[in-house]
């Protein structure tokens, strides 16, 4: 089996695995603050102290995964397009 065929065969497995991860755990650790919610600073003596809150995760330490963000966006657009609360116009 050539490397191209192997890559094409593994692509659905990787995609389904990431989809399962997004369903099981929609939030991942923030990459900027590494899940702490803030940056660490050192004072003049070299001791660690708390810095500013992380702007990416808003001090929660968690961020929504890209796959879950795409699914939420798709679901919102789908619901908006199939809205049944509006009555149909009859002519």
Image: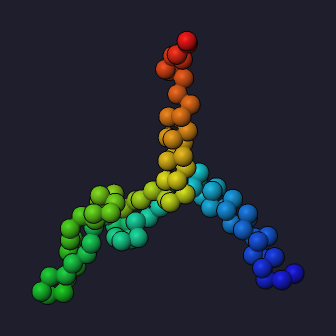
The single residue placed furthest to the bottom in the displayed view is 45
Q: Residue at x 62, y 61 (%)?
A: 18
Quarter of the picture holding the N terminus: bottom right
Decide if residue 40 is in sight here.
yes
Residue 67 % position (x, y)? 55, 57
Q: Residue at x 20, y 71 (%)?
A: 51
Q: Residue at x 54, y 17 (%)?
A: 88
Residue 90 lies left or right of residue 37; in this view the side is right
Residue 86 % position (x, y)? 49, 20
Nearest the camera: 10 or 43?
10
The single residue placed furthest to the front in the displayed view is 91
Q: Is residue 20 above or below residue 36?
A: above
Decide if residue 27 is in sight here.
no
Q: Residue at x 41, y 59 (%)?
A: 63
* Colouring of the image: rainbow
Residue 76 % position (x, y)? 50, 40
Residue 14 % position (x, y)? 68, 66
Nearest the camera: 49 or 38?
38
Quarter of the picture holding the C terminus: top right
Residue 48 lies left or right of residue 70; in this view the side is left
Occupied quadrant, residue 52: bottom left
């Amino acid at each position: 089996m050539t490397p191209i065929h192997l890559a094409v065969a593994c692509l659905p497995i990787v995609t389904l695995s990431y989809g399962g991860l997004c369903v099981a755990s929609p939030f991942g650790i923030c990459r900027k603050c590494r899940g702490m919610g803030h940056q660490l600073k050192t004072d003049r003596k070299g001791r660690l102290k708390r810095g500013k809150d992380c702007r990416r995760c808003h001090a929660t330490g968690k961020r929504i995964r890209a796959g879950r963000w795409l699914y939420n966006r798709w679901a919102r657009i789908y619901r908006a397009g199939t809205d049944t609360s509006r009555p149909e116009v009859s002519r």
